[in-house]
Amino acid sequence: MNNKIFSITGLNSKDLKGVISGLETLLASYQVYYNNLRGYHWHIRGPLFYQLHAQFEKWYDATAEKIDEIAERLLQLEAIPENRVSVLVGQSKIKETTQMSDSAQILPEILDNYKVLMAIERETLRTASEAGDEVTVALMGDLLAEQEKEIWMLTAYLN
């Protein structure tokens, strides 16, 4: 780690180990979630095709931006974000899906994925708060706020 960066930011590299670990798990989980969303976009069938095909594209585009934010935060903390899919799948708390085409299966799966992502974010937020890492705290807060709104909207849609 480059101690010059930490001497300027005031962060302690020793305190950030848990934050970095949380961000690495979150990055891997988002990468798998992103790939799942792409698959849902490609494979969706049925009467909700047009609506959900477009929605999955919005979600995976937004998820790609989140992935970049998390990777850049890791770089700011002098960590190296993983990009090898083979490694990311092993680090992810979200499992890969394939060829899911039924919205009755996909939408609950997305809610389950949100649950996993939010648990990682809340733990990373707690760890970052303890380390005095307000930037990561803010990033996790932004992710959680957006997801809570998406969950509200998705559950309203499903009901």
Image (tube, rainbow, N blue to C red):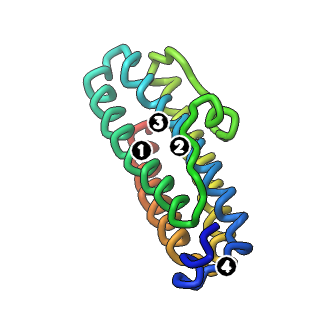
- Verify CB contact (< 8 Å) between mark 3 and mark 1: yes
Residue in view at x 46 percent, y 58 percent: 72
* Residue in the picture at 48% in, 65% down: 139
Distance in Å between CA atoms under marks 3 and 2? 6 Å
Q: Is residue 14 left or right of residue 34?
A: right
Cα distance in 3D space between marks 4 and 2: 26 Å
- Near mark 1 (Cα within 10 A), the count class, few <14, some 14-19 or many ≥20, is some
Q: Is residue 91 left or right of residue 44?
A: right
Q: Percent from the top left, x then y, of residue 118?
A: 58, 54
Q: Earlier in the sequence, mark 3 or mark 4?
A: 4
Which residue is label 2 attached to? 30
Is the C terminus in the top left, top right, bottom left or bottom right quadrant? top left
Residue that badge 1 annotates: 63
| Mark 3 Cα-neighbour bin, 10 Å: few <14, some 14–19, many ≥20 | many
Earlier in the chain: of badge 3 and badge 1, it is 3
Q: Which residue is mark 3?
A: 34
Asked if the residue at tag 2 contacts the one at tag 1, i.e. Cβ–Cβ closer than 8 Å, the answer is: yes
Secondary structure at badge 3 equals helix
What is the x, y in percent for residue 123?
67, 62
